[in-house]
Amino acid sequence: MVLFLKPVFQERIWGGNALTQFGYDIPSDQTGECWAISAHQNGPNVIENGKHQGKTLDEVWEEDRALFDNDSRTHFPLLTKILDAHDQLSVQVHPNDDYALKHEGEYGKTECWYILDAEPGSEIIYGVEAQTKEELEQLIDNKDFDHLFTHVPVQPGDFYYVPAGTVHAIGSGILILETQQSSDTTYRIYDYDRKDKNGNTRELHLEQSKEVIDISNRQPNTSPHTKEIDGNTYTQFVSNTFFTVEKWDVSEHLTLTKPHPYCLVSVIEGDGQLTVDDETFTVQKGTHFILTTEDKAIQFNGHMDLIISHP
């Protein structure tokens, strides 16, 4: 049983209107996030088809765990987003599981980014220049962010793995698909002294940030592996204890062998048909769905690019 999902949109101070290119009806010109596959309490998706139509993904996770191979985790483990950084995001860091469970009551947040689009000259902040914990704390205390943050230019098609503890920020003019642990805990380090709609500067979390920043992992990014399979291009971006993220560029026909009993799928370009067992669905750029344990014979027909992830 395929689960098609209705996106949830989050307005953000840095958001724009680029999500309209996916055919979405967004709430405003400051829409920063599409929560595309989410069972998180801050934005669970509604199921659009089948026997669970109208229920939220977190409800289905609780009621019909067999669809997810009877996964023993208490919460659905992953969250897929599309982010429109019309303006630059705050510089931030996420805690790991141990710290987040102790201090925030939810899992930590390891994530990764596939760059869907980027204006010329776009860049991200990815890591820090500090060599020691003492130097890190001194630079933060002195607000010497020019010497703290590492800036990296990006272009469409790039991939970045952002493990918990990595200082990061998406720069302006960038559209990304993010795969992450299902967590919404963020510690802000710097926010360009911006004010919200009420004229207030947003809260910073400098003490928490100093505790969770990991300066030992200086080169966290992965090396994607690409190969041609039956006329289609397959790329594995990352595979670890948190998630595996893959990309399929489908040229005409793809018979998919699921890499995991349940998989999260996002169509990021193109369109076509998805046939699962004896049912056929039309899919297009901006469609998101979960292939569940029940889904056996899976065929894609058309020209489309897919991001597929699983725990």
Image (spheres, helix red, strand yellow):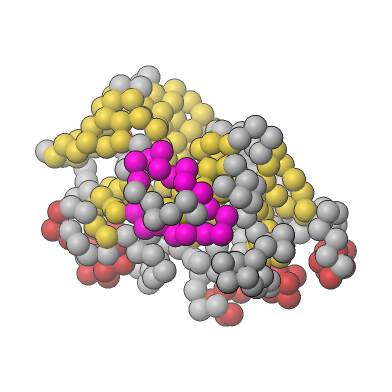
Q: In this view of the protein, can residue 311 be seen by the observer?
A: no
Please tell me whether residue 257 is drawn above or below residue 54 in the rendered image.
Answer: above
Please tell me whether residue 258 is drawn above or below residue 157 in the rendered image.
Answer: below
Q: How many marks?
A: 0
| Residue shown at 62% from the left, 61% from the top | 164
List x then y, in percent, for residue 29: 47, 51
Magenta part of the chain: 7-24
In screen coordinates, is 105 left or right of 215? left
| Residue shown at 76% from the left, 59% from the top | 215
In screen coordinates, is 10 left or right of 132? left
Residue 273 versus residue 190: which sits nearer the camera? 190
| Residue shown at 59% from the left, 42% from the top | 173
Please tell me whether residue 177 is drawn above or below residue 236 in the rendered image.
Answer: below
**For the view shown, which residue lies furthest in the top direction?**
231
List x then y, in percent, for residue 168: 67, 54
Residue 276 sits in quarter: top left
| Residue shown at 21% from the left, 54% from the top | 48
Please tell me whether residue 165 is drawn above or below residue 62 in the rendered image.
Answer: above
List x then y, in percent, for residue 57: 29, 62
Residue 134 sits in quarter: bottom right
Residue 185 versus residue 192: which sits nearer the camera? 192
Quarter of the picture containing the C terminus is bottom left
List x then y, in percent, for residue 155: 61, 33
Please tell me whether residue 72 belongs to the stretch shown in magenta: no
In screen coordinates, is 83 left or right of 276? right
Q: In this view of the protein, can residue 27 be seen by the observer?
A: yes
Please tell me whether residue 13 belongs to the stretch shown in magenta: yes
